[in-house]
């Protein structure tokens, strides 16, 4: 849900950029509506995630499977903040390995963390290339 909200917030800007600009007055109202909708979806996703952690703590499952819960948290953070999720995924995998319990969430967090980190570096490289090209073009 958190990722869907982020996508909803970014969608009108991506469409505006791909469409080559246009009527900025109409775009502002459209973007504002998407931003409000996306923000509500993000808030709902954070609330659902927080309530699930609270339920795990209250039911006592937090102490029994702390490495697995940390793996789930790491997976979410690997998508949002790749380096943080990657580090937490490694910690969760080490805890689960020590306890002798398999932890698919931790492995997924490590894979997603590395993937998002690599995609972030590639995206920034692309932005720099495009901005340098745009700055060097002579417009009539």
Image (spheres, grey):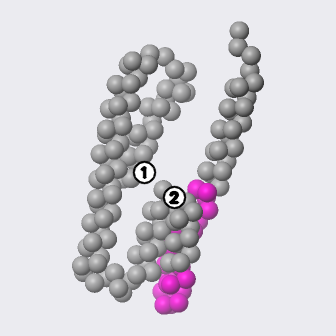
Residue visible at 53% across and 65% down? 84
* 95 in magenta: yes
Residue range corresponding to the magenta coloring: 93-117
Mark 1, residue position? 3
Q: Position of residue 4 (x, y in %)?
A: 40, 48
**C-alpha separation, residue under disc 2 versus residue under disc 1:** 12 Å
Q: Nearer the viewer, residue 116 or 81?
A: 81
The numbered disc on residue 135 is none
Question: Eyeballing the image, is 51 above or below 58?
Answer: above
Q: Nearer the viewer, mark 2 or mark 1?
A: 2
Q: Position of residue 95 (x, y in %)?
A: 50, 84
Question: Eyeballing the image, is 32 above or below 92?
Answer: above
SS of the residue at dot 1? helix
Mark 2, residue position? 81
Report the predominant secondary structure element of the magenta stretch. helix
Q: How would you rate the neighbour count of disc 1 (Cα within 10 Å): few for under 14, some for 14-19, many for 20 or more?
A: some
Residue lying farthest to the front in this orientation? 135
* 74 in magenta: no
Quarter holding the C terminus is: top right
């Amino acid at each position: 849900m958190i990722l869907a909200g982020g996508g909803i917030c970014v969608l009108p800007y991506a469409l505006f950029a791909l469409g080559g600009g246009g009527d900025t007055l109409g775009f502002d109202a459209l973007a504002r509506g998407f931003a409000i909708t996306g923000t509500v979806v993000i808030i709902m996703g954070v609330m659902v995630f927080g309530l699930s952690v609270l339920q795990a703590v209250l039911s006592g499952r937090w102490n029994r499977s702390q490495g697995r819960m940390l793996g789930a948290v790491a997976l979410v953070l690997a998508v949002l903040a790749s380096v943080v999720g990657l580090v937490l995924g490694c910690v969760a995998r080490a805890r689960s390995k020590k306890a002798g319990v398999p932890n698919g969430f931790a492995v997924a967090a490590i894979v997603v963390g590395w993937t998002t980190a690599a995609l972030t570096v590639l995206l920034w490289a692309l932005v720099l290339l495009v901005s340098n090209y745009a700055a060097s073009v002579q417009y009539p």
